[in-house]
Image (cartoon, rainbow, N blue to C red):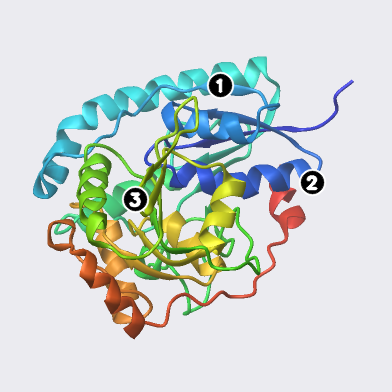
Amino acid sequence: MNTKKRILVAPLNWGLGHSTRCIPIINALIENGFEPIIASDGVALELLKKEFPTLSAFELPSYNITYAKKANGFKIKLIKDSPHLLKTIKREKKVIKALVETEAISGIISDNRFGVRHKTIPSVFITHQLRVLSGNTTWLSSKLHQKIISKFNECWVPDYMGTINLSGELGHPKNFEAPVKYLGALTRFKKRDVETEYNLLVLLSGPEPQRTYLEEKLLSDLKHYKGRVLFVKGKVESEQQKTVMDNVIVYNYMTSEQLEIAINKSDLILSRSGYTTLMDLEKLEKKAFFIPTPGQFEQEYLAKRLSSERIAPYCDQDDFDINMLSEIEKFSGFKSQEYELNYKKLFGLF
């Protein structure tokens, strides 16, 4: 008879970051004698099913978040999408209620899924955005987000508590009303001592259509790049594909283990300034160049902050030129912080 407590882990399907940062949590649950159950939709669900083929996995209603074609249309599109979003949250709550009953769930960990909680069961919300940037409506988006977070038992922030941190004012706002725990950087990767094989690693992810725009732009720009390039599209498909174009090796996606080796073996990283990517690169102490997703305030803020701290340069998608990579030399790159997270204590909630 199975006496393990079953914990539902449900990341948002928006890019790959939410699901990949749940990987260390799922592993820690297993190590601490729990039985994790996965729930998500789209590529986030596919990725976790590939990482954990033996765990039970359930599909949740899709938020269907895509970007506007133009950066400045992002906010208008979000407002237009909000009735659909609210409907999805309602449907999500229904699915969770049923899962709690049929799967005997003892705890819930939601990474940015608003409807994944239950009144009678300890429910945790993971986010690094206690403050949600949205231009001149930041006060409103932050207020709404805090209201949602307060409905959970705890909020876990994947960042360091002190002044040297990765999320800046996103994860460290003043007067925040909710029980918050800082977890340090959440990453599935470890630093390895390996020979450098690639001069440049391009890591793509994030919602369409912007992911494809950047892919096409970079593949054409890289024709003028002299070094060895590994290009990972961040498209989770049923089969892994590899193609070679002159000095560029292209993969549609990589498993965690392959990606860990690839980043360790690469001299420079070119990617979006998504928060999960920053946590990964900090752990592996890499030098990087960032191209924030157009219209995504959070990525723009993080890229500017890293640039002002002289850690990594960035530029807007439309302005990028392959020669800008030489800028990286003037920046320090990431330095890792030693931090041991006590998972046993953290999971005491369940």
In the picture, which quadrant includes the C terminus? Answer: top right
- x then y, percent, for residue 162: 52, 77
Q: Position of residue 42 (x, y in %)?
A: 42, 27
Give the label on residue 246, or none. Answer: 3
- In this view, the mark in front (3 or 2): 3
What amino acid is found at the position of numbered circle 1 in the picture? Phe
Q: Is residue 74 visible?
A: yes
> Which residue position is annotated with label 1?
58
Extreme-front residue of the structure: 246
Bin the neighbour count of mark 1 within 10 Å (Cα to Cα): few under 14, some 14-19, many 20 and up: some
**Image height of 79 relative to 62, above or below:** below
First in sequence: mark 1 vs mark 3: 1
Picture residue at 51% right of the left edge, 42% below the top: 254
Residues 56 and 43: in front is 43
Look at label 3 and name its amino acid: Asp
Judge left or right: residue 291 versus residue 287. left
Furthest-right residue in this view:
1
Q: Secondary structure at mark 3?
A: loop
Apparent side of residue 99 relative to residue 213 in the rendered image (left or right) = right
Q: Is residue 36 left or right of residue 124?
A: right
Amino acid type at image mark 2: Asn
Residue beneath disc 2: 32
As measured in the structure, the alpha-carbon distance from the residue carrying label 1 to the one carrying label 3 is 41 Å
Whole-percent x, y for residue 245 in the image: 34, 46
Q: Nearer the viewer, mark 1 or mark 3?
A: 3
Asked whether residue 154 is in view, the answer is no
Residue 200 in which image quadrant? bottom left
Give above or below for 162 relative to 10: below
User: Marks 3/2: CA distance?
Assistant: 47 Å
